[in-house]
Amino acid sequence: MDIKSIKLDILYKLWRNRCFGRGHMLIDNVLRGFPRDKINEFRDALDELVKDGILIIKKTRHGDAVFINPRKRVLIRELLKEYYDFL
């Protein structure tokens, strides 16, 4: 898996669960469901998405959570449409 497909998998999971603005998902839950042997690659990709400003971190009492930056919503939708034909 290349880094772009890993990032798109993470974004699709957040998109599918409607994690925009007020809706958020704990980082542990974002990474759940992906292959265990590649979890470090997914964690690195998640960190890159945060650094790029595509995802935003929210502190919660259960741990850090992430959500999609609402200002980048249109850009993310176009990226996901290229990769996932059914959107």
Image (cartoon, rainbow, N blue to C red):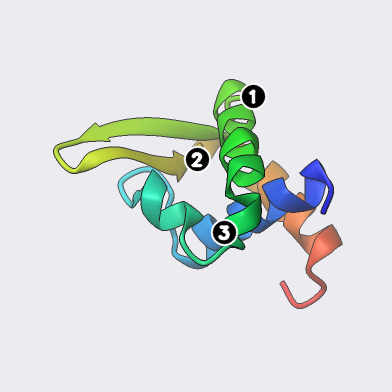
What is the distance, in whole Å, between disc 1 and disc 2 at their CAs? Answer: 14 Å
Choose mark 1 or mark 3, whichever is in front: 3
Can you tell which mark lies on residue 52?
A: 1
Q: Residue at x 38, y 50 (%)?
A: 28
Which label was assigned to residue 13?
none
Residue 35 is situated, as x and y percent measured from the top left of the image, at 61, 62
Element on which disc 3 rests: helix
Q: Which residue of the protein is positioned furthest toward the top in this rendering?
A: 51
Q: Residue at x 50, y 40 (%)?
A: 70
What's the residue type where badge 3 is placed?
Arg
Residue under circle 2? 70
Q: Position of residue 42 (x, y in %)?
A: 62, 45
Label 3 Cα neighbours within 10 Å, binned few <14 / some 14-19 / many ≥20 = few
Asked whether, in this view, residue 18 is left or right of residue 78, the answer is left
Residue to which mark 3 is pinned: 36
> What amino acid is at disc 1?
Asp
Secondary structure at badge 2 equals helix
5 and 17: which is toward the camera: 5
Measured in 3D between alpha carbons, the distance from the residue under mark 2 to the one under mark 3, in whole angstroms, is 30 Å
Residue 4 percent coordinates (x, y): 80, 45
- State the quadrant of the N terminus: bottom right
